[in-house]
Amino acid sequence: MDDMHQIRLNGVPTSAEKKSICCDECGAYATTKWVAFGQVIGMVIVFRIQTVRGNLCKSCIHEHFWEYTLVTLVFGWWGVMSFLMTPFVLLNNVIRYVLCLRMPPVPREQPASLAAAAKPSPATPAADQPWWTVPVELRPARPRR
């Protein structure tokens, strides 16, 4: 019997299985689904887009959907370009959320062996920084000759 088969029999998930059942946001071992929610904030001339993507559990999907959709619904219309983008972002968020409604709820109690091994990596916000920030590397000045 190979190691992969033996691990599955013992109930400890492999790294590939962990990826599909461990929430990227909270680390809960539950059914997950890959989602991407967008948020648009219009500021007359400029706008800001923020997204969250990852394999998320039902409670994290619910939390991110309402946060991102309500902000877009209120602040998405205030810019020229964001006015055009807001309906598409809202439609995307609603469709992805509706497709996740039939997921089973997150179990309240996590198995001790799995919960101890869980190290959640947060879902990756694609635009966590404001659009005007640029990463700068500071180096000491070279001495003049």
Image (cartoon, rainbow, N blue to C red):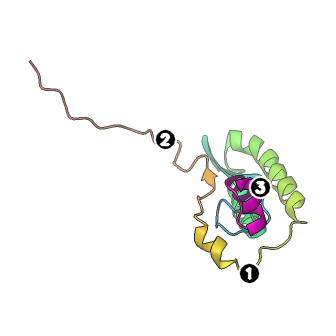
At a point 66% along the width and 71% down the height, the residue shown is: 114
Label 1 near label 2: C-beta < 8 Å?
Answer: no
Q: Does dot 3 land on a helix, a strand or a loop? A: loop
19 in magenta? yes
Nearer-N-terminus badge (2/1)? 1
Where is residue 23? Give x, y as percent: 69, 62
Is residue 117 visible from the viewing direction of this image?
yes
Question: How many marks on residues?
Answer: 3
At a point 63% along the width and 56% down the height, the residue shown is: 123
Task: Residue type at mark 1: give it.
Answer: Arg
Q: Against 47, is 35 above or below?
A: below
Nearer-N-terminus badge (1/3)? 3
Q: Is residue 133 left or right of residue 36?
A: left
- Toward the viewer: 16 or 44? 16
Please state, as top left, top right, bottom left or bottom right, where the N terminus lies in the image: bottom right
At a point 82% along the width and 49% down the height, the residue shown is: 92
Answer few, some or many: residues within 10 Å of disc 3's Cα (few below 14, many 20 plus, some between 14 and 19). few
Task: Residue type at mark 2: give it.
Answer: Trp
Which numbered circle lies on residue 108?
A: 1
Q: Does dot 2 land on a helix, a strand or a loop? A: loop
Which numbered circle lies on residue 1?
A: 3
- Magenta segment main secondary structure: helix
Which numbered circle lies on residue 132?
A: 2
Nearer-N-terminus badge (2/3)? 3
Q: Does dot 1 land on a helix, a strand or a loop? A: loop
Answer few, some or many: residues within 10 Å of disc 2's Cα (few below 14, many 20 plus, some between 14 and 19). few
The range drawn in magenta is 1-20
User: Residue 56 falls in which quadrant of the image?
Assistant: bottom right
Q: Against 102, is 76 above or below?
A: above
